[in-house]
Image (cartoon, rainbow, N blue to C red):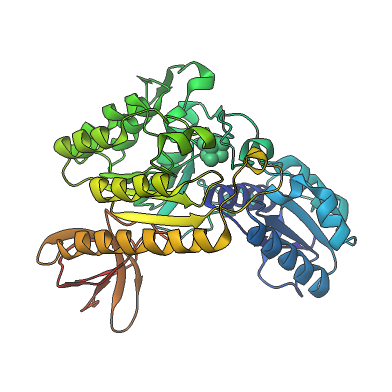
């Protein structure tokens, strides 16, 4: 093998983009490139961008600018890469631009700048790359991407034009990856996609084989099989289609985490139709009630948009009433902002900025009261947590109700003897609006 060739990497955006970065890094490492953590030490820098909303695009352009200034040899990929022109206009020095999931193109762009290291027939680097590939998350949890793209056309979203229609990974491939991750010490698998409930529809739910057993290639089959791995399994981006009901008993039995991340986005049927949301006509409140009867421990996380074009005070009031009834645990709320290329831009009756802000404030006031009461109800209870970080005076952990990065934390006193990845049972002593103290 000749002297090493060094690649710097900047990864921006959502967990799906992070998984793309992991794949590119794994391939580069297998080919003999070194991955370095400074601009100065790199022969080339790859920037994986996010292009979802204007602020994310700006952050991507700034990151590209910094890489150009500090290194000079820059390859751009990821969601913003779909709009190569916008990037080249601001940073004409960039060497190549590709869109999301363009693994081979990125790697061949790297070959153009710094030729592939010459490897001997016996490749010792293969042994240096762990079987689970290179991970950018801590060792004890990992994102498991089950599909790419999306078949829906929500009017505010440009993801299908960035990432294409739904392409599910065969169930045996997903399970093999999950098993490799667990064998490497992962204690929590975070299932991600654009639409987890739609998993397998493009493959006609083809049955796969895993450890000699048939596994149905749909959401339920996948969850049942993942439950056998004996680690926390957390589902993100689930739409409330009727078949989601089949997953709730698995949660009630403790086989997968009693946690659902469902981006409802609104509660008014009229606005949901304007948004062209999947499962817009489902009676969501009745479903939530039925789920909680089967699985009282269920944690529900969601995101909402206020100030969507055409949203009246009555629609907004419907949303507030829904919040009161649904008693969701964790919420993200966004004020609607136009995304270049989204159909919603053509809708009439935009909501004034001041009204958006006022609705956002009212929304947050209601939800904060609900979230904080739900956290207060945990004081005095014993809960199981996974440890993320251990410092001198405390450990930072998460309960089953908390996904990394987006939800709250559980701060633990007396951290002696704890390690990241440990699962421990603790007594909750206090709660504030977001976090628990135990
Ligand atoms: S379900 Fe809607 S919001 Fe989600 S990725 Fe698909 S089109 Fe976008």
Quadrant in the rendering for residue 281: top left
Q: Is residue 182 left or right of residue 65?
A: left
Q: Is residue 89 left or right of residue 255?
A: right
Farthest-out residue, right: 92
Vertical arrangement, residue 24 with respect to residue 242, above or below: below
- Quarter holding the C terminus is bottom left
Which residue is pictured at 34% across the width and 52% down the height? 187
Where is residue 388? Give x, y as percent: 35, 65
Which residue is pictured at 82% across the width and 73% down the height? 69
Vertical arrangement, residue 271 with respect to residue 27, above or below: above
Ligand 1's quadrant: top right
Where is residue 93? Give x, y as percent: 89, 62
Vertical arrangement, residue 232 with respect to residue 61, above or below: above
Q: 421 or 68, which is in the foreground? A: 68
Where is residue 210? Give x, y as percent: 40, 25
Vertical arrangement, residue 316 with respect to residue 169, above or below: below
Q: Is residue 9 left or right of residue 314?
A: right
Q: Is residue 141 left or right of residue 372?
A: right
Farthest-out residue, bottom: 393
Asked if residue 115 shows in the view, the reply is no
Where is residue 63? Give x, y as percent: 71, 66
Which residue is pictured at 85% across the width and 62% down the height? 90
Which residue is pictured at 52% across the width and 51% down the height? 15
Tally the numbered discs.
0
Q: 339 or 379, which is in the foreground? A: 339
Quadrant in the rendering for residue 152: top right
- Quarter holding the N terminus is bottom right
Asked if residue 325 shows in the view, the reply is yes
């Amino acid at each position: 093998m000749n002297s090493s060739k060094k690649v710097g990497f900047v990864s921006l955006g959502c967990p799906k983009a992070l998984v793309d970065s992991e794949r590119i890094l794994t391939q580069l490492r297998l080919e003999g490139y070194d991955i370095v953590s400074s601009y100065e030490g790199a022969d080339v820098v790859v920037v994986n961008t996010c292009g979802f909303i204007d602020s994310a695009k700006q952050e991507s352009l700034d990151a590209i600018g910094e890489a150009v200034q500090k290194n000079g040899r820059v390859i751009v990929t990821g969601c913003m890469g779909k709009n190569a022109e916008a990037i080249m206009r601001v940073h004409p020095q960039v060497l190549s631009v590709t869109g999301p999931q363009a693994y081979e193109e990125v790697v061949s762009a790297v070959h153009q700048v710094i030729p592939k290291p010459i490897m001997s027939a016996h490749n010792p680097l293969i042994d240096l790359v762990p079987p689970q590939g290179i991970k950018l998350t801590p060792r004890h949890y990992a994102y498991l991407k089950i599909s790419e793209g999306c078949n829906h056309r929500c009017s505010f979203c440009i993801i299908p034009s960035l990432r294409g229609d739904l392409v599910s990974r065969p169930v045996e491939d997903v399970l093999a990856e999950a098993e490799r991750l667990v064998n490497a010490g992962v204690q929590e698998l975070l299932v991600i996609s654009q639409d987890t409930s739609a998993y397998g529809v493009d493959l006609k739910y083809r049955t796969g084989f895993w450890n000699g057993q048939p596994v149905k290639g749909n959401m339920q089959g996948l969850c049942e099989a993942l439950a056998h791995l004996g680690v926390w399994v957390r589902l993100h981006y689930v739409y409330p289609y009727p078949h989601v009901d089949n997953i709730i008993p698995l949660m009630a039995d403790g086989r997968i985490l009693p946690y659902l991340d469902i981006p409802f986005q609104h509660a008014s049927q009229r606005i949901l139709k304007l948004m062209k949301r999947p499962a817009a006509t489902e009676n969501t409140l009745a479903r939530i009630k039925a789920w909680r009867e089967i699985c009282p421990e269920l944690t529900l996380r969601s995101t909402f948009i206020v100030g969507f074009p055409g949203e009246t005070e009555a629609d907004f009031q419907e949303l507030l009433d829904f919040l009161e009834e649904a008693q969701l645990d964790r919420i993200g709320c966004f004020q609607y902002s136009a995304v270049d290329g989204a159909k919603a831009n053509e809708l009439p009756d935009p909501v004034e900025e001041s009204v958006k802000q006022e609705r956002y404030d009212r929304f947050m006031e209601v939800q904060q009261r609900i979230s904080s009461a739900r956290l207060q109800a945990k004081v005095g209870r014993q809960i199981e947590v996974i440890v993320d970080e251990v410092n001198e005076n405390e450990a930072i952990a998460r309960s089953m109700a908390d996904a990394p990065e987006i939800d709250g934390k559980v701060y633990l006193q007396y951290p002696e003897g704890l390690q990241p990845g440990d699962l421990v049972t603790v007594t909750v002593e206090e709660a504030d609006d977001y976090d628990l103290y135990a």
